[in-house]
Image: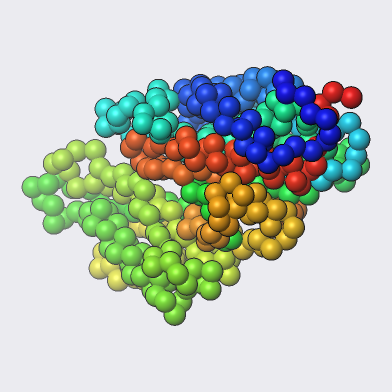
Amino acid sequence: MIAVAAASVDQDRIAEAVAGLRQYMTDTLTGFVQCRSLPGQETSAAEFLEGALADLGLTSERIALRTEELKNLPLYSPACCPDGGRYNVLARHEPRSAGGRAVLFNGHLDVVPTGPHELWDPAPFDGELRDGWLYGRGAGDMKAGIICALAAFKALQDLGVQPAGAVGFNGVLEEENTGNGTLATVSALQSAIAAAKLSAFDAVVIPEPTHERMMSAQLGVYWMYVDIVGRPAHAAYMTTGVNPVETGLRIVDAMKQLEHEWNLPENRHPAYREHAHPINFNLGQIHAGDWNSSVPSVCTLGMRVACYPDMTIDEAKQRVEARIRAVEAGLTDSDVRIDIRYEGFHAPGCEYDLDVPAMQLLADAHRRVAGELPQPTALTATTDGRHFRLMMDVPVTCYGPKVQNVHGFNECVSVDSMVRVATSLALFIHDWCGVEPLQA
């Protein structure tokens, strides 16, 4: 450990300390990626994070996911997975003396499905390092960002100092399908703050893979399922049946038309003026039939729908459902039944203020590392930032490393970018929280 004479550290020494942790970051990320934390199976990643936090001298608290207790909260999303004893991991460094400002680093443990493993090179859960990029499902989205935050904290420790304000690390469930993991932590924090058991965090940074940009807005997102019941028949007498797949394709065409309308320049939200195609209605799943020589009886479409921050999720649902019902009204066979249900995301969009002191300090930290201020970016996705913005009104943004192929084959993260982001976060902690000697 390098001793320091005073409770502040030169920027160059911080950068040097983070650079010295490159191997720590790649080794830790490899182990993290090897935890196959698919939806509903995140416990191995939670346990891994608990160990990494313990290595930094931090004690973790488990915040159990109890969906029934969240249902009446405004940002609740209909659950996709059973609770099953799953939990978030929350750790909090407390300084010896109050006075420094506090920051929470929030990141998700869950990853999306991989698709066929044989279409990956390298394999999705190997965590292999190639030519400066570390590969694997969740490597970029967003386990690398969590490791960047840990490395930033560790670098200060290695320099003989620690933050003079509280620093939290929150590893959460279900960011990829509901956001209820972060919702559980926010609810627990609000209760503890109200009971004067805990002081509030003054800023939140979510190290999502933003390509070293800072999030200024995010879209609203919801998931819907459309169940179409037709009339099955033998293929030899196909005209006596009603094929629900054909009706489903008409619904998809109607959705694409509405998507086109919302993307027209005159209909775009101001934050998305520069985006050519910010709104995406993604047909993520289609299930139908069980026999090639039978007209299917049921077709189910699973879709992800986006909307602008100035449109509520309920309003978006109403507009989309109206288009689906218009397709239904145009059908000639009354035997067809169309049901719409909602599971997963019910996530409103929002904008973020990057001019507040915390965000300005983070931007300046990046400037000192990269030589220029980070570009603001209006994300065409949802993030857990909405919980802190809309429920706690605390300064928050997403800022994280450069990645490739998120949600696709051969997802990977740039290790050079991880080092830059970790250095920026270390400088931010130093400037925002202040530092004090590690040893009294």
| The N terminus, quarter of image | top right
Question: Residue 123 is drawn in which quadrant?
Answer: top left
User: Which residue lies most toward the left here?
Assistant: 236
Above-or-below relation of 13 to 364: above
**Point 55% across, 41% down: residue:** 420
**Residue at x-position 60% and y-position 53%:** 367
- Above or below residue 384? Residue 264 is below
Residue 184 screen position, x and y as percent: 69, 40
Closer to the camera in the image, 73 or 121: 121
Q: Which residue is drawn at 43% across and 53% down?
A: 304
Q: In the rendered view, does 6 fall on the left or right side of 125?
A: right
Instruction: Answer with left or right where residue 137 lies relative to residue 159.
Output: left
* Percent position of residue 94, x then y: 83, 32
For residue 131, say whether it is visible: yes
Q: Quadrant of the C terminus?
A: top right
Residue 244 percent location from the top left of the image: 27, 54
